[in-house]
Amino acid sequence: MTAETSGPSTGLTMYSTQWCGYCHRLRSQLDREGIRYEVIDIEKVPDAAFVVEQVNGGNQTVPTLVYADGSAQTN
């Protein structure tokens, strides 16, 4: 599994890709605010794209944030 973390786990996971400009912008904003998160690249982690599709009605839309309680926000 290929994932990056910005600090100790907080239960916030960001599904992303390397080429996504919106993902890079969101990461910068989260970092600036001191919000810790884990980043999972849906092109490198098996089954990560499936998680994103489940949250987004079959679409691989990034960034997708998934919170510890299972709720999610997209793009």
Image (tube, rainbow, N blue to C red):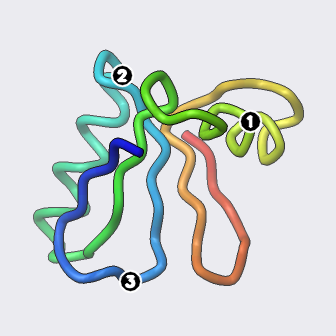
SS class, disc 2: loop
| Figure label count | 3
Whichever of callouts 3 and 2 sits on the residue coming sooner in the sequence is 3
Residue plotted at (43% across, 27% down): 44
The residue under label 2 is which amino acid type? Cys
Q: Which quarter of the figure has residue 31?
A: bottom left
| Residue 11: mark in rendering | none
Compared to residue 20, the image places residue 27 above or below, namely below
Q: Which quarter of the figure has residue 60?
A: top right
Q: Pick the residue in front: 9 or 64.
A: 9
Question: How many residues crowd around disc 3 within 10 Å: few (fewer than 14), some, or many (20 or more)?
Answer: some
Compared to residue 63, the image places residue 28 above or below, namely below
Which residue bears the numbered disc 1?
50
Left or right of 10, for residue 8? left
The residue under label 3 is which amino acid type? Thr
Compared to residue 59, the image places residue 39 above or below, namely below
Q: Nearer the viewer, mark 3 or mark 1?
A: 1
Which residue bears the numbered disc 3?
10
Please identify the residue farthest to the right as the structure is shown: 57
Which residue bears the numbered disc 2?
20
Compared to residue 46, the image places residue 69 above or below, namely below
Distance between mark 3 and mark 2 Cα atoms: 23 Å
Please identify the residue farthest to the top as the structure is shown: 19
